[in-house]
C-alpha cells in the first residue's frame, strides 16, 4: 500500500498535475488547504466582522531532496455564512476552505480546494470511529460548543485540529480507503457535477470534476478505484457533447495510460467503453484510430466481447450510480 500524508510517497506514484494532465510524450515520465470597550480588536477579529477568518501565517514550503512527495492539508481561510445582511432567517455557520497539496522537489502550484463545515468533519470522525474503533482510539476531535462559534480563536483551533485529523486519516490505509473518507472528499462536488451533467451543462460540470480528480490523485494511487472512476467520468463529460471539450483528448490519453496495466477486475468493464469513446474522439479530431482499434481487435481474439453495447457513462453508472442521465 502507498505511504500517504506527511510521509514520503513511493517513487512510482506520479505527483499530481499542475493544472492539466501531461501530453502523450509525458505520460511515462515520473511525475503526473476581541473587541471590547475602547480597545481596538485584533486584525483577525476585524476580518471576522466581515465574515472572513484568515490564518496569520502558514507553514513554510520545504522541498524534498529524495524524490518523494509530501501530502499537506491546510485550512488558511474560513467564511461565516450566510454573509451579513443575507438570508437572515438562516442560522449562521462557518465554512472551512480546505487546501490539499502534494509538494515535492518543487511546490505544488495547483492545489485542490474544497469547502466543508464542522458537521462534515464530525460526520467523518464519527463514521471512522464506528467503523475502525482501534485506529481511532484516543484521537482528538474538537467538541461542539453552544456559544462562540464565530470567534477567531475557536476557528483557528478547529482548523488546526481538522488538519491534524485529516493528516492522520490519510496516513492510515484502512482509514484512507474507507467509504467515509471518500465521501468526505468528493460527495458534495460530485453530486453538483452530476446535476450539471443531467442538465446537459457539461461546461459547468467539467471544472468541478477536474478539481475532484486533482484532489483524489494527490491522496490515492494513480490506478486506484476512486481515481480511475473520477477520471473516466471526466472523460465522459468531455466527450458526451456533439463538440468535445477542448481538454477531452488530454484526459482521454491519461485515462488510456492508466488502464494499460490495470489489475482491478471490477474496473475492467470501463475499459472497452473507454476505448470506443477514445476511438470516436480520435475520429472527430482527424487522428489515427488504429492503435485503439488494434487493441480492441486483440481483445476480441482473446474471447473478450468488445461490442460497443453501452456508453462510458452507462458503464460508470453501473459501478457508481449517481444522478446524471445515462
Image (spheres, rainbow, N blue to C red):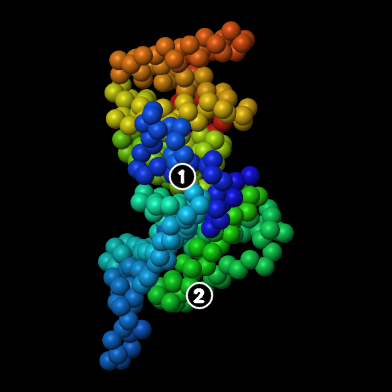
Where is 218 relative to 89, above or below? above
Point out the tag, 2 or 1, that comes first from the N-terminus: 1
Q: Looking at this view, is 187 or 73 the one in front?
A: 73
Residue in front for this viewpoint, 174 or 62: 62
Q: Circle 2 sits on which residue?
A: 146
Question: In the drawing, what numbered circle is on residue 15?
Answer: 1
Rendered location of residue 157, percent (x, y)? 48, 73
Q: Nearer the viewer, residue 89 or 242?
A: 242
**Mark 2 closeness class: few <14, some 14–19, many ≥20 residues within 10 Å:** few
> Callout 1: 10 Å neighbours few (<14), some, many (20+)?
many
Residue 1's place in the image compared with 139, above or below, is: above
Residue 243: x, y in percent? Answer: 29, 23
For this view, does 263 lie left or right of residue 149? right
Where residue 224 sits, quadrant-wise, is top right
Residue 205 lies in quadrant: top left
Residue at figure coordinates x 44%, y 72% from the top left: 156
x 46%, y 67%: residue: 159
271 up-or-down from 122: above or below? above
Regarding residue 80, the answer to whether it shows in the image is no
291 vs 238: above or below: above
The single residue placed furthest to the bottom in the displayed view is 38
Amino acid at each position: 500500500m502507498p505511504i500517504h500524508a506527511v510521509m514520503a510517497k513511493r517513487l512510482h506514484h506520479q505527483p499530481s498535475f499542475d493544472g492539466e494532465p501531461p501530453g502523450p510524450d509525458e505520460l511515462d515520465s515520473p511525475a503526473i488547504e476581541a473587541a471590547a470597550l475602547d480597545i481596538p480588536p485584533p486584525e483577525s477579529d476585524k476580518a471576522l466582522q466581515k465574515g472572513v477568518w484568515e490564518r496569520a501565517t502558514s507553514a513554510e514550503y520545504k522541498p524534498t531532496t529524495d524524490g518523494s512527495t509530501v501530502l499537506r492539508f491546510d485550512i488558511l481561510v474560513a467564511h461565516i455564512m450566510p454573509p451579513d445582511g443575507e438570508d437572515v432567517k438562516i442560522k449562521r455557520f462557518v465554512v472551512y476552505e480546505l487546501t490539499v497539496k502534494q509538494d515535492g522537489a518543487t511546490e505544488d502550484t495547483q492545489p485542490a480546494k474544497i469547502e466543508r463545515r464542522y458537521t462534515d468533519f464530525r460526520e467523518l470522525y464519527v463514521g471512522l470511529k464506528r467503523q475502525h474503533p482501534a485506529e481511532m482510539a484516543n484521537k482528538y476531535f474538537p467538541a461542539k460548543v453552544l456559544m462562540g462559534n464565530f470567534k477567531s480563536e475557536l476557528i483557528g483551533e478547529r482548523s488546526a485540529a481538522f488538519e491534524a485529523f485529516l493528516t492522520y486519516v490519510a496516513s492510515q490505509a484502512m482509514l484512507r480507503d474507507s467509504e467515509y473518507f471518500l465521501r468526505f472528499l468528493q460527495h458534495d462536488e460530485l453530486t453538483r457535477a452530476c446535476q450539471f451533467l443531467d442538465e446537459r451543462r457539461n461546461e459547468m460540470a467539467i471544472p468541478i470534476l477536474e478539481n475532484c480528480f486533482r484532489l483524489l490523485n494527490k491522496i490515492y494511487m494513480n490506478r486506484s478505484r476512486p481515481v480511475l472512476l473520477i477520471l473516466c467520468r471526466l472523460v465522459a463529460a468531455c466527450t458526451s457533447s456533439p463538440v468535445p471539450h477542448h481538454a477531452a483528448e488530454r484526459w482521454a490519453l491519461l485515462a488510456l495510460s492508466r488502464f494499460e496495466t490495470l489489475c482491478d477486475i471490477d474496473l475492467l468493464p470501463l475499459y472497452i467503453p473507454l476505448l470506443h469513446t477514445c476511438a470516436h474522439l480520435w475520429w472527430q479530431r482527424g487522428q489515427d484510430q488504429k492503435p485503439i482499434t488494434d487493441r480492441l481487435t486483440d481483445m476480441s481474439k482473446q474471447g473478450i466481447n468488445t461490442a460497443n453495447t453501452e456508453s462510458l457513462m452507462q458503464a460508470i453508472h453501473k459501478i457508481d450510480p449517481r444522478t446524471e442521465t445515462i
